[in-house]
Amino acid sequence: MYGQRDTRLWPDRLTEKSLPPPSVLAWVCDALCLGFVRPLALYTLLLLFGPAVSRAQNGADFEGKQIVRIDFDPPLTSQPLTAEGIARRMAVHIGSPLKAADVRSTIQNLYGSGRYSDISVDAEPAAGGVALRISTAFNYFISGVNVEGESEPPNKAQIVATTKLELGALFDEDQLDQAEKNVEALLRANGFYSANVEVHVDRTPPTQEANIYFFIETGERARFAGVDFLGELTQPKENLIRATRWQRRFLFIRLPGWRELTQTRLQNGISNVQEALQKGDRLLARATLDQLQFHPDTNRVTPVLRIDPGPILQVKITGAKLSQSDLRKFIPIYQERTVDRSLLIEGQRNLLDYFQSQGYFDAMVDFTQSTPTPQHSLIQYSVERGPRHKLVHIDITGNRYFDTETLRERLSITPASFPRYRWGRFSQKMLDRDRADIENLYRASGFRDVKVVVPPPQDGYRGVPGNLAVAFHIEEGAQWLVNKLDIEGVPAADVQRLRPMLSSIAGEPFSDAAVARDRDAILSYYFNDGYSDATFDWTQTPGPTPTSVDLRYTIDPGKRLFVRKVLVRGLNTTKPGLVASRISLNDGDPLSQLKMINSQQRLYELGIFSKVQTAIQNPEGDEESKYVLFHMDEARKYSLNAGIGAQLGRIGGGTTTFDAPAGATTFSPRLSLGLTRLNVFGLAHTAGVQTLFSTIEQRVLATYSIPQLGGNDQFSLSISGLFDDSNDIRTFTAHRVEGSVQVAERLNRSDTIQYRYTYRRVTIPADTLKIEPLLIPLFSQPDRNGSVSVSYIQDRRDNPTDSTRGFLNTADFGWSGRQLGSATEFSRLQFSNSTYHRIGRNLVLARVLRFGYIQRFAGGVAVPPGTPSFEKIPLAERFFSGGASTQRAFPENQAGPRDPVTGFPLGGNAYLLHSLELRFPLIGDNVGGVFFHDMGNVYSDFTHINLRPWQLNNRDFNYGVNAFGFGIRYHTPIGPIRVDLSLSPDSPRFVGFSGTRDQLLAGTGTPNVPQRINIFQFHFSLGQTF
Amino acid sequence: MTLKTAILLLLPLLAPAEVVDRIAVTVGKQVITESDLIRDLRVDAFLDRKAVDLTPEAKRKSAQRLVDQILILREAEESHLTLAAPGDADRLVAAEKSKFASEREYQAALAKYGVTEADLSEHLLDGLRELRFTDLRFRPQVQVSDADARQYYDKLTADWRSAGRPTIPSFEESRAQMEQLLSEQRTMSALDDWLEMTRASRHIEYKEAAFK
């Protein structure tokens, strides 16, 4: 037996060194056969020599033997791969002879799945052959990094980031030590020197997840205890200490003590000191942290800053004037805080561009660098501006395929126009870029041989010195077309699906850009269908004509990946069902990156997660079905907001006197406070209270909103309660208590329907009513109004805050009936239509039509206008309009009928308003202008709607008031800041009363005082008018 | 005799299982098994005509060599470098075979070392690939100036003189050799640097159980 061993594949130590000598074996066998020992002794000998004999049996003897059994340890049912996944990877099979190469392949294949950290294969003799046992140890993958006990700063996200533990990646115990050290370092950097960090790993073997927890006890944050400086100080130490802002302060008052240490505060302090040092001519001054001395007994730190004042550096410009701020903007040494030749050259180019853009198209800029003394460096830019030009004409010729307007839209050079571009926009760099852009545009459309010739700009255009004309001569050349497109490497069914997405099909222009688009479309298609390794290649061959090509796309989709299971982690209070409804990936689906991102987006949209991460578990593994991880960090449940602001406008006037019925300019400070509770019941419901306090309004609004009604994200429900005291309508002060329930149905991205029930009780104290005394008893009656209403909103604007294209339609119909708890029966219809049109490159024409109508009912029958009961629509339910967002001929809520005695507005039962705006850029890209015309009014009723542009007498308010004006818009990220000045030649005249309430009631005072809405109105607000 | 046969048949059934193969090293997703190490050491021994050394130290050296080989071959694949032609393996095996007096002697030697011709062929081909990779990837970067060659020559001649060598060739006579030697040294040094950097950037794990 020993002599017959096949030692080719098996280790020597197992074959030669570990075997008992042949003589011993032979002796045992002979002894047994000769019957010298008894059965018990035989058993003892077997136990004694069994293992040694078995080693003699090792792999070498198993080679070629039939495999009769394959076991797994842990058993197959506990293996991380599916049974099919394992079967696919097995190169050894029951019934086949055992081969060492197959064992190796099996190990490699199983390991390649990424699911195992170690694999070994044992063999043992079995009846009829050999039994294999495959022993495996599992890998674990990070399914979440959780932080508890932190005290901001650093916040959770910063701590998670510093661990460098990535969701879905292979978990390695060795990473934890480094992660823990990183967290401790981050905490120390933020002043937590006595922080205690504990790491706990929660493993889930079935899905091989390692959920990592960092439990932090921060201890007390250290405070600064002063600051020390090393090196030469060019400023008084006190100034530098002040610059750090590490001392406690309240506004400009220095308080005793020092602030707490945070990483940001430390860095900002050092930067501030550096900036302070760099003021003047010390641009290269440096402040660096030499050390941060920690005093454990007092838990304080003393930063030691090393100061290097650097040389005196002067930057001068000759030949032209330039402000210091412009100089700092154009010369990048100020931003980079260093001086080298490349930055000085960049500054030279920036200056040249600037002067060219100012009309000095022939400008020349040069610079010199010198060191008059060792500690003094001088950089001198010399500018020769040359004569000033104005770009007045751009000529484009030779273009046939694209019309001239299409090409002009792409140019960055711009002819002069007042006031936006006084000298036009022109520089050699812009001209070169425009020429390249035109060529690229043509090439993208198949004109591979296009040439755009730009002769030197023509000075003295049409005989005017300084006027410049630029010409683009386009030689289009022939258009190359695709003759034939073959797609290879994918099934015919895929080809059919792909073709409609492609640009480079037969008959279409041929260009590299179009092929690149096709490549992106094809790869996106496959990536989103689970083929994450898809590749694309293409070749072109000459077509049948000189300007045609045959294209061949070769696609290799690679292996398709599927979703094994979606794992959602990190939920504490949120219901899993809510999250599941937002994830569009299902078990068994092709693994689509797009769906993962969309699901992430939809989860963010719930507004209850501060962070949503998604990743594939074990991304490097070659298994076909992957776990997809979603890890959520729930946002804080409560958020508090506070705001302070002011309102300025014609919103005031005496409260006890009847002066200024059209409003007096008043300043009204306002304070708002709000508390929001997110994710109520773990269902993404939101409850909130918002309060507003100002001199003209006090409001408390409580809301409860459900973003997905019944799990359907097309429907949302909101319930609100409102307590409001306001005198924004100057005629009265209203105490309003209101409750409403609204269901909103989102039909699609742009269309929404809202169904609403509202009940409100409005009380108008008699002593606040500024109307004819006889009517006070009627209008001071408390108003109960219960109504159902439905609104339809159709929003197809390109940008809701500053629209340039599209339209917005809104329609609202409400019914207030006695059955609904209303004291007065009436219906209310309101409609608005806004449209936005772009004219040319820069102009936008916007218009809006608004219409509203209240119909009084009595006993379910419509009451005709003009009858006494028609007039009984409560004041608080009437339409009030006018102001910055509606009719700019009026101050806020001053349009429409007015009290014949006091002159205060009474509101109306109908309105018709139309506004037209021409919006245009004014200065640069951020300041725009508007010419507007507003027309219309609030009318006493529908039958009195009249667009007559003049007032018949001072009691006639049913006419169309016109306002013309000009406005300025300053564009900001949250919408434009708006200033409008209007002129209304036919603003209403009316009569008022001069005196006090007592005088009015007593019939004294001065009645019939002529009044008029000022023909000039000034409005200031945020956002476009409509 | 029957009892003896029965006992011999029974003995294996009582024997515990043996490890037939296991992971020795992992390089990313690729594994080197214990049997890979042993085969490598056997082929090496066959080529050097020396005794097979399967000590843990020898296995560890073999593992390091195979790790480098994997890194090199992976880099070559990612760089789309063609490192071997179809007939290379046959040519290398034939050259090795030619060192034996007869086919029979050759086969006997293979059997003695426990390797197959396929093992030998694969081993030689991998070596060739490593050489070609080194040539393609690193040799073009290596520059040897006249001054370098002269400096190297001076150092060598100083060593020769102190060793009492009777005749020393002139610089011109040995310039080509100096340049070649320096070029080789620098190429190998570049390869070593690259390997060190690549090893540090890859996840390489040695399973100690395979080296006991």
Image (tube, coloured by chain):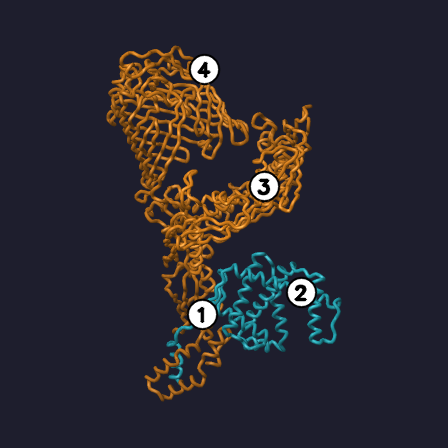
Chain colours: A orange, B cyan
Image mark 1: chain: B
Label 2: how many residues lie within 10 Å, few (<14), some (14-19) or many (20+)? some
Name the residue at 48% across, 28% down. Answer: A969
Q: Quadrant of residue A348?
A: top right
Secondary structure found at label 4: loop
Q: Nearer the viewer, residue A752 or A696?
A: A696
Image mark 2: chain: B
Label 4: how many residues lie within 10 Å, few (<14), some (14-19) or many (20+)? some
Q: Which mark is residue A425?
A: none
- Return the residue at label 3: A281
Q: Amino acid at mark 4?
A: Pro
- Return the residue at label 4: A985
Marks 1 and 2 close (CB-CB < 8 Å): no
Marks 1 and 4 close (CB-CB < 8 Å): no
- Return the residue at label 1: B209
Residue A891: percent from left, percent from top? 40, 21
The first of marks 3 and 4 along the sequence is 3
- Disc 4 with disc 2 on a shared chain: no
Q: Amino acid at mark 2?
A: Leu
Any part of residue A165 in sight: no
